[in-house]
Image: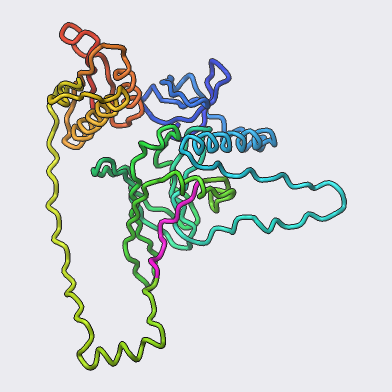
Amino acid sequence: MNVGDRVRLLTGREEGIITRLLSDELVEVAIDNDFTIPVLRREVVVVAAEETKAFGQSAAAVAAEKKAATSGANRAAKAAGVAPPAPTPPVKTEGPTPVKADKTAPPSVQKGLYLALTHQSPELLALQIVNHTDRDVLYTFGEERNGQYRGLRAEKLAAKSASPALGHWHLKDFDQWPAAVVQLLPFQLNGTSAYELLTKRLQFKAASFYTSRQPNVPVLQREAYLFQLDEKPAAPAAIAPEKLAETLKAQLSGNAPAKPAAVAPAPEPAKAIVAPPHEVDLHLEALMPEGAEGMSNTAILKLQLEAFEDALSRALATNMHEIVFIHGSGNGTLRKELHKLLSRNRDIKFFEDSKKEKFGYGATLVRLK
């Protein structure tokens, strides 16, 4: 079993996608209504590949998949405040009259390197790199969050192929998605040309994300949100013919305005990452000792979650083995949000209530890989 495989629970009819390999015996599965649960490997079976190979994909399955993808995109677009994509009208095929080509059909995707996001369920997207060129390419993929980069994968990708799933992102967390950072180095065995390293940073915005949907992406042969990674910069603006003689005359006579010398900006010193304390107090009075009069409960929760993510990322970057987050017992809202984020993090070995004799149920111990 691999991350991205579609599986069915042997104890029921539910199906889902494997999003994490928790251990040799345990996997995390995102059920189609988009909640994740840990399941023993022996209690699930991979079904999609074998069933499709043996029986083909039925029309009902195709319709269900398209309906799931459309409903997920429409709900997310509505939540983001943008208009959902218009549905594709059915094509009438009855009768002897030939069907006319749709003049409004989207143009075919040109050759290039792309980042594609495909629906695994109505709310779960998988990220893949698509190599729609005739050259092989070496690539790295990582995420940037709060100014800190974390490399996740590096491989060779053959021509006319797609990478394995590089990550699984939830549409409901769209506003919290990290920036995707991709580096690409095309090459051709026994070729006569060398290529420059391409670096692309993608920070997704709702207005452009939902208009990027392509109905049939090359190589993947399915619908996806598609973003080109090897776009060429625009050519420099040409001088108008009537201005060319005047410009040359001014340059030759020495009357042309002096151009400022190009000064390379001084490189910023690398920021040293400081390890957080072993116990991180997320109480409001610890985060804002000067007081937080007038802050709403939503703003307070956001502040606490930002402090949690900052401490966790620094703990991972400095190779800490464990860290304790003190969240208090209260109404349990902060504890629930922390556990939800921890359950989706692949760098977490496990987490549990910490030192009940000291904190009660007001702290969580996180053991890092």
Place of residue 45 in the rendered image (x, y in percent of width and height, measured from the top left): 52, 25
The question of residue 227 being in magenta is answered with yes
Residue plotted at (68% across, 33% down): 60
Foreground of the two, 155 or 364? 364
Q: In the displayed structure, would residue 362 be above or below residue 204? A: above
Magenta span: 225-234
Q: In the displayed structure, would residue 77 be above or below residue 324? A: below
Foreground of the two, 368 or 229? 229
Q: Is residue 256 left or right of residue 53?
A: left
Residue plotted at (66% across, 36% down): 63
Place of residue 81 in the rendered image (x, y in percent of width and height, measured from the top left): 48, 39
The question of residue 187 being in magenta is answered with no
Residue plotted at (65% across, 37% down): 62
Foreground of the two, 346 or 278? 278
Q: Kindly give the residue lying farthest to the top in the view shown.
A: 357
Q: In which quarter of the view is residue 292 placed?
A: top left
